[in-house]
Image (spheres, rainbow, N blue to C red):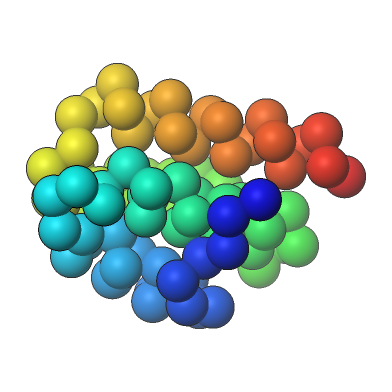
Amino acid sequence: MPTAPRCTPAALLSAVASIPEGERNDTLNKCAYGLVRYIRAGALDPFEAEDELSMAASYAGLDDHEISATIASAWRVLGEAE
């Protein structure tokens, strides 16, 4: 399972927003995993976290379909791991 670039939700969102082309989907995937862990622990509101992650990824240039699929994948994989 990928690990997030940094630990805090703010750092995860910052990492996504500043992704260089060629690393965007991989970084989004790692950050989605990190945020889902915070959500599962009850530390973040799932709707707010997903909205913020989506906005950061969109700012970085990812399209809506890619963003939605990557976030959904993180939910599925982490849901199966628990």
Measured as percent of width and height from the top left, residue 33 is found at 57, 52
**Can residue 39 be seen at all in this image of the molecule?**
no
Left or right placement of residue 46 versus residue 66 in this view: right
**Residue sitting at x 29%, y 59%:** 16
Q: Nearer the viewer, residue 3 or 44?
A: 3
**Residue sitting at x 15%, y 58%:** 20
Measured as percent of width and height from the top left, residue 71 is found at 48, 37
**Residue sitting at x 73%, y 54%:** 40
Left or right placement of residue 28 versus residue 49 in this view: left
Q: Nearer the viewer, residue 62 or 52?
A: 62
- Which residue of the protein is positioned furthest toward the top in this rendering? 65
**Can residue 74 be seen at all in this image of the molecule?**
yes
Q: Quadrant of the C terminus?
A: top right
Left or right placement of residue 81 versus residue 32 in this view: right
- Which residue of the protein is positioned furthest toward the right in this rendering? 82
Measured as percent of width and height from the top left, residue 69 is found at 43, 25
Above/below status of 7 relative to 54: below
Above/below status of 22 relative to 8: above
- Which residue of the protein is positioned furthest toward the front in this rendering? 22
**Residue sitting at x 39%, y 28%:** 68
Tag count in the figure?
0
Q: Nearer the viewer, residue 64 or 18?
A: 18
Measured as percent of width and height from the top left, residue 72 is found at 53, 29
